[in-house]
Image (cartoon, helix red, strand yellow):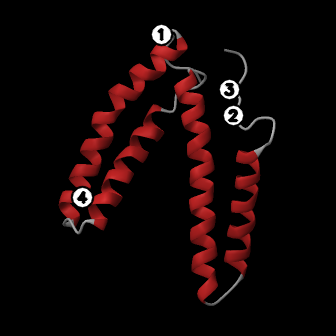
Amino acid sequence: MDEAPKAPWSPFPLTEVVILLALVLLAVGFVSSGNRRGVLIGVGLVLASLAGGELAMREHFSGYRSHTTLIAGLTGFLAGALLVALGVPKGVVLLAAVAVGVAAFPFLRRAFKRRSGGLGFRA
C-alpha cells in the first residue's frame, strides 16, 4: 500500500481540524490564567490524543504502518484509567495496566501483519 488509508469522512479533513482545534486550545491554555487554564489544556490534550489515536489505529489496522506499541500502550492506559475509576489501589493499577499492554501487543502485531501481507515492520 503506497498511500495512507482514507478516513470514512474523507474528503473532509476532520482529523486535521480536530488537531488544529487542539493546538489552539493548548496555546490559549498556556497563555491564560485562572481556572480556565487547566480545562483548556486538558481538553486540548484529550482532543489531540483522540485525533492521533484515530489516525494511528486507521493506519495500523489497514496494514499501512505499524503502531503496535502505541496502541498496546493506549490499551494498558485505558485499562489503568478504568481501574483508577473503580478505586483499585495504585500498585495493582500499575501492574494490571502493564499486563494488559503487554498482552495486547502480540495480538496487535498479528493484526498488522495480516493486513500488511505479512511484511512485518514498515516505517
Q: Which residue is mark 2?
A: 7
Report, in whole angstroms, how far the alpha carbon at label 3 lies from the one at label 1.
18 Å
Q: Which amino acid, mark 4? A: Val
Is there a contact, CB below 8 Å, between mark 3 and mark 2? Answer: yes
Question: Which mark's residue is nearer the viewer, 3 or 1?
Answer: 3
Dot 1: element: loop
Q: Which amino acid, mark 2? A: Ala
Q: Which residue is mark 1?
A: 118
Does label 3 or label 1 sit earlier along the sequence? 3
- Quadrant in the picture for the C terminus: top right
Residue 116 or 122: which is nearer the viewer? 116
Q: Which amino acid, mark 3? A: Pro
Is there a contact, CB below 8 Å, between mark 3 and mark 1? Answer: no
- Place of residue 27 in the rendered image (x, y in percent of width and height, measured from the top left): 73, 70
Does label 4 or label 1 sit earlier along the sequence? 4
Circle 3 packing at 10 Å, graded few (<14), some (14-19), many (20+), is: some
Dot 3: element: loop
Q: Is residue 11 left or right of residue 111?
A: right
Q: Which residue is mark 4?
A: 93
Q: Which residue is mark 3?
A: 5
Q: Is residue 83 left or right of residue 54?
A: left
